[in-house]
Amino acid sequence: MSSKKDPDVSKKPRSAFSRRGFLGGVGVGGGVLGSGLLSPVAEAAPASGPAAVPITLKINGKTQNLTLEPRVTLLDALRNHLDLTGAKRVCDRGTCGACTVILNGRVVYSCTVLAIDAQGKEIQTIEGIAPAGKLHPVSAAFVQHDAQQCGYCTPGFVMAAKGYLDRHAPKSIEDVEKGLGGNLCRCGTYVGVRQAVLEASREMKGGRNA
Amino acid sequence: MQPFEYANPTTVKEAVGLLGNKWDEAAVLAGGTDLISLMKDYVYSPKRLVNIKNIKELGGIRADKAGLRIGAAATIDELAESPLVAKNFPSLAQAARGVTSPQIRNMGTVGGDLCQRPRCWYYRDGQGLLASPGGRSLVTNGENKYHAILGNGGPAKFVSASSLGPALIALGATLTLQSSSGSRKVAADKFFVTPSAEGSREIALLPNELLTEILVPMGGTKNATYEVRQKEALDWPLATASVALKMSGSTVSSARVVLGHVAPMPWAATQADQFLAGKSLTEAVAEDAAKAALSNATPLSQNAYKVQLARVAVKRALMAAAGARG
């Protein structure tokens, strides 16, 4: 699976300590207690990490057990540890929407949610919105209206549209524009996307069928 | 992102016990919409994150005799959708709806909006909050079209990123800050500060404190927020104005006009407040109040256009408030 891992495209730290130095200085297994760096952790609220810790995620109804550092985002957990590569890593800064998933019924940017923070929540990804071999009404409407070009933003748009239609019944293109305001398409397929979402809305009978 | 320790307290007492005396010891993790990106860019690398989303007492929006109580961890979406807020404080509901992208409103919190760091691109590039490496301002000498047009005489040229701050100041809100040694109340207009030295922050919160609650008094004001923005999709506004008017019949008895995204802190336009007092609110009066609000503007080399945008925001917010129910 390592060949599938997204490269770490973020900048290297300028002056901050290296990861190796940090872990070496504080002890990998023992956390940072007693290192003198931090105040002691209250007993009732134990801290995890910085080394990898067991993390349990409920994704598309299925429980997944992982061992991850607290700094791993939900997006990277999905893509690099669970092979769920539908959610895309594009801006990786909570702006473009390509990583959109549904968390407890709400659309979120999975690149700015920590996997450790998503524990105990219902996580829905593009892979889990329709039974195998079938299309969700939103996906079907995207096909019908040619609502994609290169397709890289599409899974995020479909999830954003599904999350939106699960809660709202848009009356106009303007409603859809606002409802999908958190997703970008650099090919400029917005016209098709908006029409697709309006059609899917009729198909989903005005939403509320999550 | 640097490795960090993650703590998951369930009470405020536990949470404040996990904070440090310096910013790099521990950071509060609420929605994470700003913090996680700062950490990915190595602009900020705290050694511990204290998740506050599982602290029940920090959530929710409710009203009592003192006013509207907003938990710091209530989401922007909760604020935008709250009938209580829409009924009494349209300016706050409008400001919350202006926080663009459903994803950000679902994740982002009210406290997080107030504590988010500025969007200045030099700061985000690791050049420091004041963006003056070697004492030379990158802002003054560089790309400053989105920077401050007011309160920019000192080293701080960035604009406050808070969408809710101006409305909360205009409405006279009070913030509760809790540390392990006790709590203190800070008026919203004292919470935001303009830093004069690198390393200090743009809010009065200390590293060992947690913002727990925002109290908005039921003031019986006519209030509104108007944003001027480049696009509907995810971005911060170019200029905003939040106004709260106490009326005596059709006359303004007192006014608070606060501008957003034009200064290193939400900008109390006291000249406009003074101008409006005792006047009947007409379009001409609103226009003159807008001119007064921007009378001290000192735009940088590329952002004089923001002066007019801010005037428009003030005028339209005033007209909206005049039409809004008190």
Image (cartoon, coloured by chain):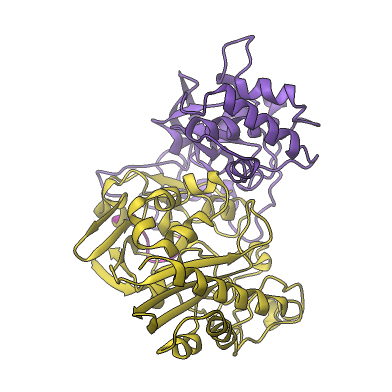
Q: Judge by depth and name the residue closer to the eye, A108 or B309.
A: B309
Q: Quadrant of residue B236?
A: bottom right
Residue at x 45%, y 90% (from the top left corner): B274
Q: Judge by depth and name the residue closer to the eye, A52 or B127.
A: B127
Q: Does B50 sit left or right of B240 as displayed?
A: left
Q: Is residue B20 magenta?
A: yes
Image quarter (top left, top right, bottom left or bottom right) of the N terminus of chain A? top right
Instruction: Please state the horizontal and vertical placement of residue A85, each as a whole percent of the image.
Output: 65, 26
The residue at the far left in this view is: B65
Characterize the magenta stretch by its predominant secondary structure.
loop
Instruction: Please state the horizontal and vertical placement of residue B97, each as a whole percent of the image.
Output: 50, 54
Question: Measured along the vertical axis of the image, is residue A143 above or below residue B11?
Answer: above
Residue at x 30%, y 71% (from the top left corner): B220
Q: How many marks?
A: 0
The residue at the far top in this view is: A133
Q: Judge by depth and name the residue closer to the eye, A201 or B231.
A: A201
Q: Does B166 sit left or right of B135 as displayed?
A: left
Q: Is residue B221 magenta?
A: no
| Chain drawn yellow in the picture | B
| Chain drawn purple in the picture | A
Question: Measured along the vertical axis of the image, is residue B250 above or below residue A45?
Answer: below
Q: Judge by depth and name the residue closer to the eye, B111 or A167.
A: A167
Question: Measured along the vertical axis of the image, is residue A54 above or below residue B139?
Answer: above
Question: Measured along the vertical axis of the image, is residue B33 above or below residue B154?
Answer: above
Q: Quadrant of residue A83?
A: top right
Q: Does B141 sit left or right of B266 as displayed?
A: right
Instruction: Please state the horizontal and vertical placement of residue B87, each as a whole percent of the image.
Output: 35, 58
Asked if residue A24 shows in the view, the reply is: no
Residue range (magenta): B17-24
Asked if residue B281 shows in the view, the reply is: yes
Instruction: Please state the horizontal and vertical placement of residue A159, each as a whole percent of the image.
Output: 59, 31
